[in-house]
Amino acid sequence: MNITEVRIRLLKKEDTKLKAVATITIDDYFVVHDIKVIQGETDYFIAMPSKKMPSGEFKDIVHPLNTETRERLKSLIVAEYHKAVQAANESN
């Protein structure tokens, strides 16, 4: 599996832990929208797209099947997030 594109949409709200929303393209054939970039206490992490169940619980719609893949996605998305923040700061 190759992540062939990562797009970041920065969010303007400064007082929230949700910093951006990412879209990834896999092998130029499959797109996953609405991956959240969230600022944790010590680092950033990603939350996969989810839907609210009748019980009120949220359940992922798509997700990696193993830790290695999740970490790879996180690294790629967070790196692109930092690039987007830097580009936004330079344009201001």
Image: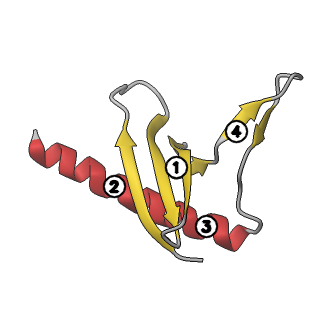
Image quarter of residue 15: top left
Distance from disc 3 to disc 4, alpha carbons, whole Å, reads 18 Å
Of callouts 4 and 1, which one flags the residue occurring earlier in the amino acid sequence?
A: 1
Mark 4, residue position: 50
Distance from disc 3 to disc 1, alpha carbons, whole Å, reads 16 Å
Task: Check the picture and name the quadrant holding the N terminus.
Answer: bottom right
Helix, strand or loop status at disc 2:
helix
Of callouts 3 and 4, which one flags the residue occurring earlier in the amino acid sequence?
A: 4
Of callouts 2 and 3, which one flags the residue occurring earlier in the amino acid sequence?
A: 3
Of callouts 4 and 2, which one flags the residue occurring earlier in the amino acid sequence?
A: 4
Q: Are marks 4 and 1 in contact (CB under 8 Å)?
A: no
Mark 2, residue position: 82
Q: How is the image coloured?
A: secondary structure
Of callouts 2 and 1, which one flags the residue occurring earlier in the amino acid sequence?
A: 1
Identify the residue at horizontal 52%, vertical 42% (top origin). 38
Distance from disc 2 to disc 1, alpha carbons, whole Å, reads 15 Å
Crowd band around label 4 with a 10 angstrom C-alpha radius: few (<14), some (14–19), many (20+): some
**Label 2 sits on what residue type?**
His
Q: Residue furthest front?
A: 29
Distance from disc 2 to disc 3, alpha carbons, whole Å, reads 16 Å
Task: Check the picture and name the quadrant holding the C terminus.
Answer: top left
Marks 3, 1: nearer the viewer? 3
Mark 1, residue position: 42
Crowd band around label 1 with a 10 angstrom C-alpha radius: few (<14), some (14–19), many (20+): few
**Label 3 sits on what residue type?**
Glu
Q: Are marks 2 and 3 in contact (CB under 8 Å)?
A: no
Helix, strand or loop status at disc 3:
helix
